[in-house]
Amino acid sequence: IVFALISGVWFACEKKQAPQAVVDSLSLELDGRRVLLPNGWSLSPAGKIMPLGDFPMNLVVSPSGKLMAVTNNGQGRQTIQLIDPSTEIMLEEVEISKSWYGLTFNNDGSKLYASGGNDNMIVIYNTSQSKLEKIDSIVIGKPWPVKISLTGVSLDDTGGKLFVTTKENNSLYTITLGTKKFNQLPLGHETDA
């Protein structure tokens, strides 16, 4: 009886292990996602991976959650991609030369404001049809080599103001959307966002 009791307690406390097939399947899936870093370490990203453009710097989601925009600002082709997050399908991709980081939707998600970087302008897209249709721009100065270089963009849609930071003349610009007039506030240091 003592032997049976000890055996029953041992069996009840024995750690249950996943079937080997499940462990092998998971291991293969993680190995397939593994990225080797220059320092020899590796990463196995969680979730799904969606290919984007050259050096994606910023991703914003529309207030409704129905659209996602990504700005790609690498040395190659610079683009903005419009994505349906529920299906993970790229709806449209447009080229925007000399762009940099700044990206924001308006309150109803019908417009996307994008930093034109060294072109020293904000490009405005209509996104109401789930496309990127360039409808306007706000020019802050002449393009490079004029050293302004727009970076971060933030919108007060209710107040009709767009706030833009720069990395070359180290300023914050406050733009009145109705008139496109702006004020410059020197910040004294570079801002990237």
Image: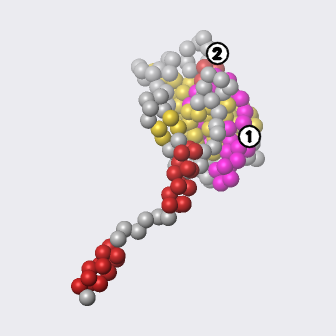
**Picture layout, residue 182 above or below residue 26:** above
Q: Which residue is mark 1?
A: 92
x 43%, y 65%: residue: 17
Magenta-colored stretch includes residue 134: no
Residues under labels 1 and 2: Cα distance? 28 Å
Q: Residues within 10 Å of mark 2 (few under 14, many from 20)?
A: few
Q: Is residue 170 visible?
A: yes
| Highlighted range, magenta | 81-108
**Picture layout, residue 21 above or below residue 54:** below
Residue 142 screen position, x and y as percent: 64, 15
x 53%, y 41%: residue: 34
Residue 16 screen position, x and y as percent: 41, 68
SS for callout 2 = loop
Quadrant placement of the N terminus: bottom left
Image colouring: secondary structure
**Picture layout, residue 52 above or below residue 108:** above
Residue 70 screen position, x and y as percent: 62, 38
For this orientation, the residue located farthest to the left is: 2
Nearer the observer, disc 1 or disc 2? 1
SS for callout 1 = strand
Q: Residues within 10 Å of mark 1 (few under 14, many from 20)?
A: some
Q: Which mark is residue 142?
A: 2
Magenta-colored stretch includes residue 95: yes
x 54%, y 27%: residue: 151
